[in-house]
Amino acid sequence: IETGKLIVRPIKTDMIKDIIDPLLEEMKPVFTEKGVVIERMLPEAAPLYGDAGLLRIVYRNLLDNAVKYGNRGGRIRLGLEAKNGDLQFEVWNEGRGLTPEQRSKLFQKFVKFDSPGETSRSTGLGLFITRDIITKHGGRIWAESEPEKWTRFRFTLPTKGPGGEGLE
C-alpha cells in the first residue's frame, strides 16, 4: 500500500450478490457461535464498478470487527442507500462503541482496541487497509459511535466506472 502498488481493477460487479451474500454465508458459523443477529436492510442488488476481491476484503474486515467488538447475542445491521450518485454502505453493531479519541485514530496503522481479556491476533492494519481500498475506489469511509452502545462504519462507492460510464 505504501509503495503505491495496490492496484484497483474495477469491473462491473454487484456488491450484494458477489460480495455481501457470499460473505454472510461463509461467516454464518461465526455469527451463530457469538449469537449475533444479522439485520439486512439491503436491496436485492447493488451494481457498481469495483475490484470485487478488494471490496470483499473491506466488507469482511468490517463484519469481523462488528462481531469482534459487538455484544455477544447482539445485533449487526447492514444497510445501503443511494446518495448523490454514490452507494453508501453501513455496518452497525451493538457493543462497547468508541470514544471520540479512538475514532480519531481508527484508520491509522497498527491501531488496536482490544477488549479486556481478549487474546487477539490482530495486526492493527485492517482499517488502514480498508480506508486505502475505499479511497482508491473513489469513495470514503468514516465511523460514528455512541460509547458503550454502538458503532457504525459507513463507506461510499461511486456507481460510475473509471471513464464515467454508468451501469444502465
Image (spheres, grey):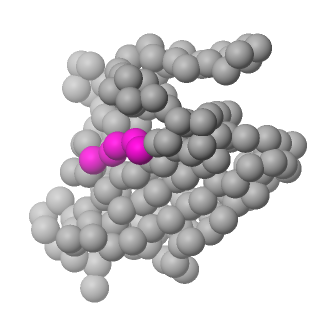
User: How many numbered marks does the figure carry?
Assistant: 0
Establish if 79 lies above or below 54.
Answer: below
Q: In which quarter of the view is residue 25 placed?
A: bottom right
Quadrant where the C terminus sits is: bottom left
Is residue 63 in sight in this rendering?
Answer: no
Q: In which quarter of the view is residue 30 placed?
A: top right
Q: Residue at 45% of width from left, 17% of height from top? A: 111
Foreground residue among 80 and 159: 80
> Quick check: 59 left or right of 30?
left
Position of residue 99 measured from the top left corner of the image (x, y, whole percent): 45, 29
Establish if 49 lies above or below 114.
Answer: below
Q: Residue at 38% of width from left, 30% of height from top? A: 100
Residue most extreme to the left = 163
Position of residue 55 measured from the top left corner of the image (x, y, whole percent): 44, 49
Position of residue 156 measured from the top left corner of the image (x, y, whole percent): 32, 56
Q: Residue at 40% of width from left, 42% of height from top? A: 143
Q: Which stretch did the figure color magenta? A: 140-144
The main secondary structure of the magenta stretch is: strand
Is residue 27 in sight in this rendering?
Answer: yes
Q: Residue at 36% of width from left, 52% of height from top? A: 155
Position of residue 83 measured from the top left corner of the image (x, y, whole percent): 27, 70
> Quick check: 37 left or right of 79?
right
Quadrant where the N terminus sits is: top left
Magenta span contains residue 54: no
Foreground residue among 151 and 133: 151
Establish if 166 lies above or below 60.
Answer: below
> Quick check: 43 left or right of 135?
right
Foreground residue among 38 and 74: 74
